[in-house]
Image (cartoon, rainbow, N blue to C red):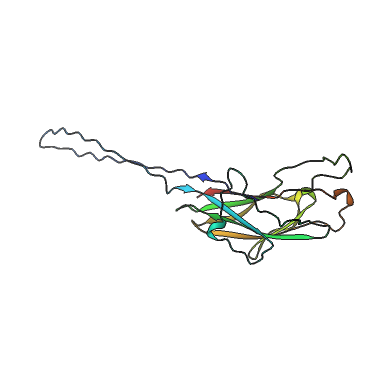
Amino acid sequence: MATGLKRMALAGGSFLAALALLTSALVTDRGEVAVRMDGSENTFDLVVAGEWGNPGWLPQASDWGEGDARPYRVALPSGAVLAPGGTVNLRVAAKNASPRIAGALTLEIRDPDPLGVARNPKTGNHLELFNQLEFTVKQESEVIYDHVSATGLGKRSVAESLAPQDFIIFDVQIGLPQNLGNEWQGATTGVEFHFEGEGL
């Protein structure tokens, strides 16, 4: 349902050698210095979580999951449908799981498996529902998308500097227009909340 993008932040280091001029006598000496550069604390990592139909939900430690290889999925309740004029509500969350690096965060809502203009060969009905959806997304009092149709969605900045171990929660409402025609009966879609982060 949601996907987080893990990104490695660049770590750098330098070694400074100081030379002293010995005026009283010429001294030659040699030593070996081993320098170990540990970047394990310099990673930028996002984890994600989500929940349907529970407006007071807060993510627990066991809820967080990586979403970089495959999207983290939130299952709809069994038999759930979305009718014309209806809405479904969920919460999604993204966490900066980095040990010490803050990061900027963007959100993009997209169709993970677009079917385009494909139709059911028996009924002639559309198979793809995503482009008919409308989205409202809020993060506390800030409105990120306000009844935006799926065709008008774009990537949005949702955090300029999310501190290590902090998370943000988004309240999402997904709806269908009241006047949606019968030619979309039986159509389905997935919805992917794609978070992308950049270590600062």
Q: Is residue 123 left or right of residue 194?
A: right
Q: Residue at image x 86%, y 54%?
A: 180
Q: Residue at image x 78%, y 48%?
A: 188
Q: Is residue 83 left or right of residue 2?
A: right
- The quadrant in which residue 23 appears is top left
Question: Outermost residue toward the left?
Answer: 24
* Image coords of residue 96 (percent x, y): 52, 54
* Image coords of residue 5 (percent x, y): 57, 46
Along the line of sight, the residue nearer the viewer: 134 or 120:
120
Along the line of sight, the residue nearer the viewer: 75 or 17:
75
* Image coords of residue 136 (percent x, y): 72, 59
Question: Outermost residue toward the front?
Answer: 78
Q: Residue at image x 84%, y 45%?
A: 126
- The quadrant in which residue 50 appears is bottom right
Q: Residue at image x 58%, y 61%?
A: 59
* Image coords of residue 197 (percent x, y): 56, 49
Q: How many marks?
A: 0
Q: Is residue 32 left or right of residue 66?
A: left
Above or below: residue 131 compared with residue 179: above
Above or below: residue 170 compared with residue 28: below
- The quadrant in which residue 13 appears is top left
